[in-house]
Amino acid sequence: MTTVRKAVIPAAGLGIRFLPATKSQPKEMLTLVDKPAIQYVVEETVASGIKDIIIITGRGKRAIEDHFDHSVELDLYLERTGKKELLDEMERISHMADIHYIRQRHQHGLADAIACAKDHIGDEPFAVLLGDDIVVSKVPCIKQLIKTYNAHKGTSIVALERHDRSDIGRYGVIKGRKVADRTYKVQHMVEKPRPAKAPSNLAVVGRYILTPEVFDHIERLSPGVGGELQLTDALSRMAKKGKVYGYEYEGRRYDIGDKLDFIKANIELALDREDLGGRLRGYLERY
């Protein structure tokens, strides 16, 4: 049984980078081939041994709840028309996890969204997976972080990814000391630094294992970059006490809020599929 039993998926953002597509639908419901992005995130969570999931939503996000719920009319239609494989898939989606929904009433940032889950989390460590980050890997990214957490219990773990200096200003960035293969003891973190002032080229991406101590630090935060409560700032305070490690995960990540990454994700995920890969590869070669 996993040492981490609960997960929080923040999915309350407005999707500004993907307007106008996200004007009337959640960015997390944008489809990658034939599945909404957030389904990939939930499937990663379940594949990591976690089935108690809290999705932080906001106004206009009801489509997420509907997706993971039963659709009686659809189920009856699929049954009546003999589409058993599709019916089984719809059943799997609605039963894959125990999903709870909490609404973030005001857009005060990622740290505030995570704080919405405090009462449900209690005094347990928990995973956080951003709803617009898709990670494809042999071992689920969160499962990799859980293994690192088990080696450093009592500490929070952040997923790390190397970036060019020119790109580093889009992320939280760590200053840290390497202590094992792919593992760093984090000493300091900075949210969206200017490239010339970034403490390293190791960026924090949308996967975390957090200890409940993080809630105390979030409560004491003042607005940071963008006027929002930044999770990076809370974790930086914890890092100064030696309570944060980073793990350079194995896999490939897509930021589906970024238009180019979204297109890459659709192409590469389709190329990986038996039913589409060959035909798509042929088309791309001809094109």
Image (tube, grey):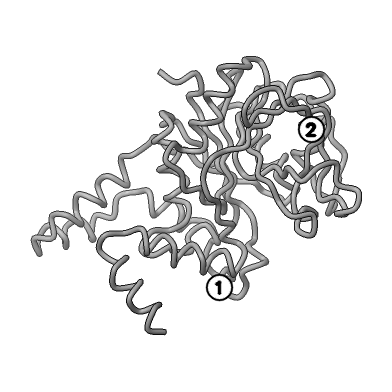
Which residue in the rendered view is the most extreme toward the bottom?
287
Q: Quadrant of residue 13?
A: bottom right
Question: Type of residue at label 1?
Answer: Ala
Front one among 240 and 117: 240
**Relative to 172, does residue 72 appear above or below in the rendering?**
below
Is residue 267 toward the left or the right of residue 252 in the image? left
Residue located beneath label 2 in the image? 234
Counting from the top left corner in percent of width and height, residue 173 is at 78, 43
Counting from the top left corner in percent of width and height, residue 233 is at 81, 37
Is residue 181 toward the left or the right of residue 286 in the image? right
Is residue 234 toward the left or the right of residue 65 in the image? right
Question: Residue at left 48%, top 24%?
Answer: 5
**Relative to 65, does residue 80 appear above or below in the rendering?**
below
**How many dots with numbers?**
2
Question: Type of residue at label 2?
Answer: Ala
Question: Residue at left 76%, top 31%?
Answer: 235
Counting from the top left corner in percent of width and height, residue 74 is at 23, 60
Q: Residues within 10 Å of mark 2 (few under 14, many from 20)?
A: many
Q: SS at mark 1?
A: loop
Front one among 158 and 92: 158
**The N terminus sits in image quarter:** top left
Front one among 272 and 263: 272
